[in-house]
Amino acid sequence: MWTRREPKLVGTLLSYLNAVMKNKPLIPIFLIVFIDLLGFGVIIPLLPAYAASFGLNETAIGLLLASYSAMQLIGAPVLGRISDRVGRKPLLLVSQAGTLIGFVILALANSAPLLFLSRLLDGFTGGNLSIAQAAIADVTDEKDRAKAYGLIGAAFGLGFILGPALGGLLSRWGYAAPAWAAAIISALSILLTAIFFPETRRSSASPAQAARREFSLAALRHALDNPTLLRLLTFGFLFNFAFSIFQTTFALFSKSQFNFDVEQTGYMLGYIGIIIVIAQVGVLPRLVKQLGEQRTVILGSASLAGGMLLTGLITTWPPLLGTLILTALGGAVVNPSLQSLYTKSVGADERGGTLGLAASVDSLSRIFAPIWGGWVLQNLGVHAPALSSAIVLLLALGFILAMLRPAFLAPRLQSVPVEAEIP
């Protein structure tokens, strides 16, 4: 039995789980995101080494990683807009089926073109996270939304703890074993969605509002006419570009600098996942409550910039354990806060499309980041990706600080309290 002396983190986790249980639609969303990210995490330490086994260099591996995001750039807003119109559940099932097929192709691949095909297919249909985010917005109040996104971030982190570690362990039996494991996990996610996920979309929209759900260039222009949303998306692009440089080059960096194999890289990525869970369960809600989402974004960006700068300076692996704390903390607190700000900048009937658009901007950053990271790693040295990431984050910090000046902030975010803004 827990006592009053229980650790604060455990108490916070229990209160979070209690909040999830009270909001029953969040339970299957939590499980679906966890299972999806478990499958995705399994192949993270595998993919660069798998691609290298077919003779691809660092730049070509960057192109392989970018191909997923290039197709997600096309698919995510389409799925988001359609989910606003026909519901979240059908589109979740479609996206998960594409992921399953992509993992099967990856497991059977015997050439580099098949590797690319597996990532292209998974990327086009892999809009399930943005749909899950829209479902959260459907079932939560604005005041609780950042906390709910933190819960989903914790599910993300749990998947990121177990997935890479499992993938690294399974790599002992060849590169196909983690891919088959990811396919089995993806099939389980489809089953969970079909049986347990309730349709969350409820609409009383007018015909004009319904028309805005359709995916079209006009719908995108309508979203971009919102100056607050446009500024948030610009910051999101810079932040995720910098974070993606780290994510997509870490396996290559750790192999080149510290001679880590796939299994060791998987365990290190699992360590990052542990930090993410701790940050999103124990740190994020306190930061949002005390500082508001906007200040949390600033603090998290500064933390990630510091982590990247220090990572670019180390030459032995033990200090990496410290720099990864700053890096993971920054990634853990910024994105849930940013997702909450996205949903507050638009009406309820545009959340799915807006989050799909945000996912496309994220995907755009993830197209360029691995290409850039692979190129600078190959041509400028092993520390160049982390240092370039730190520079981009400093630019992002300057942009968000300028954005939060009162004259630059207007028109203000819908439903964001004045005290949450920086004067």
Image (cartoon, rainbow, N blue to C red):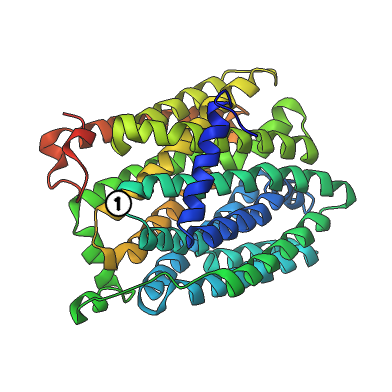
Q: Position of residue 32 (x, y in %)?
A: 58, 60
The quarter of the rendered structure image containing the C terminus is top left
- Residue at 55 percent across and 63 percent down: it is 123
Give the quarter of the image for residue 264. top right
Label 1 amino acid?
Glu
Q: Residue at x 44, y 49 (%)?
A: 149
Q: Nearer the viewer, residue 306 or 65?
A: 306
User: In screen coordinates, is 326 left or right of 405?
Assistant: right
Residue projecting furthest to the bottom: 207
- Tell me where residue 41 appears, x and y as whole percent: 66, 49
Does residue 422 lie above or below 22 as drawn?
Answer: above
Q: Is residue 101 above or below residue 142?
A: below
Q: Residue 144: image x %, image y %?
A: 35, 48
Q: Measured along the vertical axis of the image, is residue 313 above or below residue 278?
A: above
Q: Residues within 10 Å of mark 1 (few under 14, many from 20)?
A: some
- Between 407 and 91, the one nearer to me in the picture: 91
Label 1 residue SS: helix
Task: Tell me where residue 249 appears, x and y as whole percent.
Answer: 61, 39
In the rendered view, does 246 fall on the left or right side of 233?
Answer: right
Relative to 157, residue 364 above or below: below
> Which residue lies under the disc numbered 1?
142
Q: Determine which quarter of the picture holds residue 107.
A: bottom right
The answer to which image quadrant residue 40 occupies is: bottom right
For the residue pair 132 and 139, the one nearer the viewer reads as 139
Res 416 seen here: yes
